[in-house]
Amino acid sequence: MASGLPRLGGATLDRLPAGVRRPDWMRGATRIRTVHIGAGAFHRGHQADYAEDLLQGGWDAALVGINLKPPALRDLLGPQDGFYTRTLREGDGAETRLMGAIRGVVDAEANPGGALDWLSTPEVTTVTITVTEKGYCHVPATGALDMGHPDIQADLRGDLDRPRSLPGFLVAALRARRDEGGGPINLVSCDNLPGNGRILAGVVREMADATAPDLLPWIEDNLACPSTVVDRIVPALTPEDRDWLDRRLGLRDEAAVLAEPFRQWVIEDSFRAERPQWEAVGAQIVSDLSPQEALKMRVLNAAQTLLSLLGALAGHDFSHQAVRNPVLLGYVHGTILREVLPHLPDAVGGSSKDYLDQSLRRIGNTAIRHRCHQIATDTSRKIRQRLLDPLRARRAGGQPGPGLEAGVAAWVAYLAAGLPAHRDRWEPDDPVWARLAGSRNVDDLAQALLSSEDIFGSDLSRDEALRGRITARARGLLDGEFARVLGGG
């Protein structure tokens, strides 16, 4: 082991420092009634934190984690008996908690039958999901299932015994659940998609229609897909974070997560089956979450995207550095204040300015090292809800959106920085990169990207004047002219 420390696990728990908060519930007495798909860092720092609170309060159900794709949970959590630590950091303060809510793990690639079995088990009535935006295999502009997606194509050619996509896996699991007499089930998306429950329900129904149409009546009668808003900054660990945790714990925790203290979980009240009482530990169960969704995606998430793209272009490693750049901060604050907040739902009320200020303070938390490139990952799956829909709102009111257009230009410039013509600064991690990597220069890339209807829709993708303005701004950003390009925002 690289650190030379013994690994965290059931046999080494007594070596943890006294300051680590430990469960006082009987882990062996719990049942499995909830499954989580995509047990990455965000889940371990967010939904599992709520599960831990419920167990502390007397709830008797733990979790099983399933990963559809790497990393392998059997290597990450298996050797640790499902234990890991969650540390909240802000400024000089830190609070560490030993987490035990995950009782079992399954890697679907290695054991597809075992993964499907959990979702067909009658006692499992709720499945939460965090697979990132691209995991839904949908068309960003419409939310429809992307029938040309390689994983969807593989599932359509097969018989779903070894599904590769989330929609394929869920259809196979629901089919098995029906065939074995299982009852209703809640599938709860916890990914940053507008109307994530509706998108999830849509891709599942479209996949079922293509592969098992006889399942559709059962789905209509038994499946609930409530939408949610989830919020907590949980960045990938840096080497410095790992060294700090090693010193703090005296053990090596390969599944450790660092997060900010703030957390939020808003869930639409549209369930079909028994569920954990998340509201007892701070979640909000509401009839309409559209105001919270718009506020979070168009303010906090938009600020994160803008600062990550521009921060990387300006040479910053972390978002907390980008938010301290006065040119970038002034642009982001001014753009959201002038071009986004006036178009939020009326139900948001007068809290939006305070929320913007709070969001920028959270991004500026120096104890959380959130890499600009990590936030910029998969922007093609995020830009609609974060920048394009706010831009459409401006255009619908006959108002210009120079700041939002500059934000789209930042994405164009960020992608173009990966071209040889612009110094090969990095290779963007985005599904759209495969069709852009052969572009000659930023103008060539901008033409291909901005005319993509699957991302920009028919309205924006056919606007030649808009395309020209964005391309010109992208050229300026690549040349380092931040003050000139962003001054109009």
Image (spheres, helix red, strand yellow):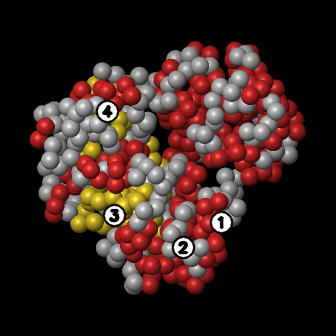
Q: What is the CA distance from the residue labelled 1 to the residue labelled 2?
A: 11 Å
Q: What is the CA distance from the residue labelled 1 to the residue labelled 4?
A: 40 Å
- Residue at which label 3 appears: 34
Mark 2 / mark 4, whichever is N-terminal: 4
Question: Who's the residue at 61% across and 81% down the image?
Answer: 213
Task: Name the foreground residue: 29 vs 405.
Answer: 29
Amino acid type at circle 4 is: Ala
* SS type, badge 4: loop
Decide: few, some or many residues near mark 2? Use Cα within 10 Å; few <14, some 14-19, many ≥20.
many
Image location of residue 433, percent across then percent down:
69, 42
- Residue at which label 1 appears: 153
Eye-nearest disc, 3 or 1 = 1
Task: Name the foreground residue: 6 vs 273.
Answer: 6
* SS type, badge 1: helix
- Residue at which label 4 appears: 2
Mark 1 / mark 2, whichever is N-terminal: 1
Amino acid type at circle 3 is: Thr
Q: What is the CA distance from the residue labelled 4 to the residue labelled 3?
A: 34 Å
Lateral position of residue 209 relative to residue 52, left or right? right
Quarter location, residue 307: top right
Image location of residue 440, percent across then percent down:
82, 33
- Residue at which label 2 appears: 160
Question: Relative to residue 321, is residue 342 depicted above or below?
Answer: below
Mark 4 / mark 3, whichever is N-terminal: 4
Image location of residue 200, percent across then percent down:
55, 62
Mark 3 / mark 1, whichever is N-terminal: 3
Q: What is the CA distance from the residue labelled 3 to the residue labelled 1?
A: 29 Å
Decide: few, some or many residues near mark 4? Use Cα within 10 Å; few <14, some 14-19, many ≥20.
few
Question: Who's the residue at 15% across and 43% down the image?
Answer: 12
